[in-house]
């Protein structure tokens, strides 16, 4: 009877050991699958992060290039504004010279008119003097 119980316990122990071994194998397989999924997710995340870092660096290069272009355009605009101001100042100076020239022409025309009137009066006086002498 004792032998039979020992055999029964040995069978139960062997069955229990098989069940334990199967459960351990399943747990290891499941653990291996989980580790593989975690590793793949990490690799994908790392790749995605590297892509994001690359995209960020490219965006930063673009921003730097655009900032440089904006700086160049600002300098060009400043130069154009300075040229416009110089042209406006030159135009005002030219307008002042032109107005001075027009005033001088008016004065010369006035003097010419006075000289013409004086010459005409003198001519008239000479004609009157000649008639009086005759």
Image: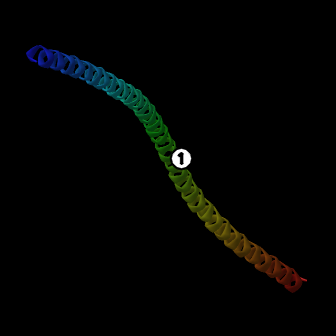
- Residue under the image location 72 percent in, 72 percent down: 115
At x 59%, y 61%, the residue is 95
Q: Residue furthest left?
A: 2
Left/right placement of residue 65 relative to residue 2 reads right
**x%, y% of residue 86?**
52, 50
Figure quadrant of residue 54 = top left
Q: Say how the picture is coloured.
A: rainbow
Name the image quarter holding the C terminus: bottom right
Q: Residue at x 51, y 50 (%)?
A: 81
> Looking at the picture, how far across and down is residue 132, in whole percent?
85, 86
Relative to 90, say whether 22 is above or below: above
Q: Is residue 65 above or below residue 97?
A: above
Q: Position of residue 3 (x, y in %)?
A: 11, 13
Give residue 85's position: percent from left, percent from top. 51, 53
Q: Where 46 falls versus 78 (above or below)?
A: above
Residue 112 is left or right of residue 31, and the answer is right
Residue under circle 1?
A: 80
């Amino acid at each position: 009877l004792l032998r039979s119980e020992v055999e029964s316990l040995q069978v139960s122990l062997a069955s229990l050991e098989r069940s334990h071994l199967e459960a351990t194998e399943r747990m290891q397989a499941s653990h291996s699958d989980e580790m593989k999924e975690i590793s793949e997710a990490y690799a994908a995340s790392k790749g995605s992060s590297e892509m994001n870092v690359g995209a960020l660096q490219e965006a930063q290069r673009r921003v730097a290039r655009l900032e440089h272009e904006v700086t160049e355009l600002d300098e060009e605009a400043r130069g154009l504004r300075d040229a416009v101001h110089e042209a406006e100042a030159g135009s005002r100076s030219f307008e002042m010279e032109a107005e001075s020239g027009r005033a001088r022409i008016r004065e010369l025309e006035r003097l010419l008119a006075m000289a013409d009137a004086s010459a005409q009066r003198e001519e008239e006086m000479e004609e009157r003097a000649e008639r009086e002498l005759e």
